[in-house]
Amino acid sequence: MAEKLVRDLLSDRIPAAELRIEENPESLRQMAIRKLHEEFGELADTDYSDVNEFADVLEVVLHIAKQGGITEEEVFSARDKKAAEKGRFERGLVWSGPQN
């Protein structure tokens, strides 16, 4: 089994010999990106219907942001600002590109 990033509190359930702390920021970032793909795949497997899988995806996204020096508050503030300026994705608006 390949190494993978796991949630902090799982250290209570996984033997210590099977765990380590990743100290290299770039390696940790790459592991977090792989974790994001894993979690997104699990969300897709639920046909995008499991709130817990949405939470897992969001948790990993926020972890990656934090690694880059971006706080959770900054992410949600930027989301709100973009929504105020450009809207959200609620209407299902699709752009078909320039018409010739």
Image (spheres, grey):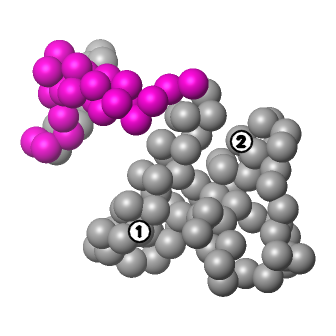
Q: Is residue 8 above or below residue 36?
A: below
Q: Residue at x 13, y 43 (%)?
A: 90
Quadrant where the C terminus sits is top left
Residue 79 placement (x, y as % from top left): 28, 29
Q: Residue at x 62, y 34 (%)?
A: 67
The local secondary structure at tag 2 comes to: helix
Residue 9 placement (x, y as % from top left): 58, 69
The local secondary structure at tag 1 comes to: helix
The residue beneath circle 1 is: 53
The residue beneath circle 2 is: 29
Residue 6 lies in what quarter of the image? Answer: bottom right
Give the Cα distance between marks 1 and 2.
Answer: 20 Å
Q: Main secondary structure of the magenta part?
A: helix
**Which residue is at the front of the view, 15 or 3?**
15
- Looking at the image, residue 57 sits to the left or right of residue 73; the answer is right
Residue 72 lies in what quarter of the image? Answer: top left
Which residues lie in the magenta part? 69-91
Q: Is residue 10 above or below residue 4?
A: below
Asked if residue 78 lies in the magenta stretch, the reply is yes
- Looking at the image, residue 39 sits to the left or right of residue 14; the answer is left
Residue 84 lies in what quarter of the image? Answer: top left
Residue 74 placement (x, y as % from top left): 37, 25
**Which residue is at the front of the view, 83 or 6?**
6
Label 1 or label 2, whichever comes before in sequence order: 2
Residue 72 can be seen in this image: yes
Amino acid type of the residue tagged 2 in the rendering: Arg
Q: Is residue 80 above or below residue 29?
A: above
Amino acid type of the residue tagged 1 in the rendering: Glu
Q: Residue at x 17, y 16 (%)?
A: 85
- Looking at the image, residue 59 sits to the left or right of residue 76; the answer is right
Residue 88 placement (x, y as % from top left): 18, 34
